[in-house]
Amino acid sequence: MSERSVLHGDADLDRQASGDGRGSSNGQSATLSYDGRTTELPVIRGSEGEPAIDIGRLRAETGLITMDRGYMNTGSCLSAITFLDGERGILRYRGYPIEQLAEKSSFLEVAYLLTYGELPTRAQLEAWTSDVTHHTLIHEEMRRFFDSFPYDAHPMAVLASATVGLSTFYQDSHDPFDPAAVELTIQRLIAKLPTLAAWSFKKAIGQPYVYPRNDLDYAANLLHMMFAVPAEPYEVHPDVAKALDLLLILHADHEQNCSTSTVRLVGSSQVNLYASISAGISALWGPLHGGANEAVIRTLERIAADGGNVQKYIDKAKDPNHEFKLPGFGHRVYKNFDPRATIIKTAADRVLAATGADDQLYEIARQLEEVALHDEYFVKRKLYPNVDFYSGLIYRAIGFPKNMFTNCFAIGRLPGWIAQWKEMIGSADTKIGRPRQIYTGATARDYVPLEAR
Ligand code: ACO
């Protein structure tokens, strides 16, 4: 067999958008030459003109599969939720620029937009807010669930476990194809995740669990459950609540990232939504994903303890013999700037002013950014600060301990996971996710009895 194959793209790919949310082919194709035969593969386009080769018939027609480590070139779905252009630093939810949503919207409104596809009317927003607000309590039996973890359990482990644990209390709403059950599950998840997250923190610090307050808005209620104690009144600072709401908006969706792809993949087995979201929370925990905000603060603290020598850590990150990477820099998709980082940087100034938090780490972060942005290694590799670079500083200024940062991220990402799951489960094209592989192990051999080995 000839081992050479060549893919030719259509030279004149027109930029016309289909706009129907299903991608359009416009009759274009790419030609694959392999083993003396040619195969035509359709080229489909999204509503922003992005082309993709549809390889759905590739194996059947050629015997080939594709190999794409880390899915750097692989689209796993058609999606009408979030548009991201990493080269131009563009992020839009349902067509709305993130900058406008960050300035004018609220997290619950964005959650509605992502979940249902359109901005709500006033009446829809009131009904949605009321529905979500009235599911914030968790079953009283679940208190014991928190008690059974070790005192130093990571809050992400507790959150992931508690989220799948919810499914045991709501066995009536597991069917992913029952619209009423799905609706109820969505409201329960968005309402209860802050309660679960706050209680995982209270458990870790040995304070009494604080019940939700439905007279507070979403972010203020989370702050109240996190920081209030029965012994004294707790006042939520409005600027702080606003900054937290902004962070939740910025985190709300980011198309097919690691945790979202996890939610879709797990969900494609038709398991209940609680289980799919729990899997997404576990994926988000990793330091190369949502866990990076925690790693950023650890690094800044190390630099501060080490006399503030920023250059030393830049050099370490550049050293090919060193595993250290600068947390909060670089992104699989953004190769220009992360628009969320730009918005967050402004918010960080406001929160530090409002809370009066000491800004030594913020100063080091600014120096680090300044040096990295002008360093050839970072410039050449297009490594810019990502959303996590500044979000950790805001969480810290608000008073969240480091190991709670990713829990907050999970609360923010939840509507995106839900919207993506809903789109996946509602699509007639969805199949169970099941990648293939190229096997590289031993070829067939006979079993050797124990005494003969
Ligand atoms: N510090 C130093 N060097 C880096 C960094 C960094 N933060 N990020 C990437 N590089 C280097 C790599 O070593 C590689 O160099 P090479 O070409 O000489 O081998 C090059 O830049 C390309 O990096 P990859 O790791 O191949 O890029 P990839 O797209 O696979 O990874 C990732 C992206 C995981 C985000 C990476 O940049 C990273 O590890 N960053 C630090 C962790 C982080 O901040 N994660 C949060 C991402 S945002 C989010 O999930 C919400």
Image: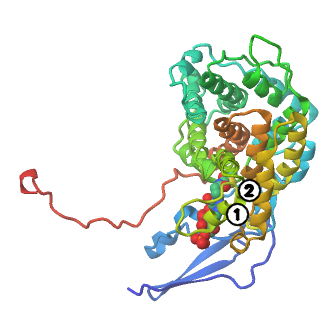
State the residue at coordinates (73%, 67%): 335
Q: Amino acid at mark 2?
A: Asn
Determine the secondary structure under disc 2. Answer: loop
Q: Position of residue 208 (x, y in %)?
A: 66, 15
The reply, left or right, for residue 36 in relation to residue 247 is left
Q: Position of residue 215 (x, y in %)?
A: 85, 19
Q: Position of residue 407 (x, y in %)?
A: 66, 36
Q: Nearer the viewer, residue 155 or 91?
A: 155
Pick out the residue farthest to the top.
231
The reply, left or right, for residue 4 in relation to residue 297 is left
State the residue at coordinates (60%, 25%): 204
Q: Nearer the viewer, residue 314 or 399?
A: 314
- Report if the beta carbon of the residue with label 2 is closer than 8 angstroms to ligand 1: yes
Tell me which corner region of the image, top left, top right, bottom left or bottom right, holds residue 274: top right
Q: Quadrant of the N terminus?
A: bottom left
Can residue 135 be seen in the rendering of this structure? yes
Pick out the residue farthest to the front.
307
Determine the secondary structure under disc 1. Answer: helix
Q: Report which residue position mark 1 lands on.
A: 311
Give how far apart the Cα atoms at labels 1 and 2 are: 20 Å
Q: Report which residue position mark 2 lands on.
A: 386
Tell me which corner region of the image, top left, top right, bottom left or bottom right, holds residue 256: bottom right
Q: Which mark is residue 285?
A: none
Q: Amino acid at mark 1?
A: Gln
Of badges 1 and 2, the one in the foreground is 1
Quarter for ligand 1? bottom right
Mark 1: give few (<14), some (14-19) or many (20+) Cα within 10 Å: some
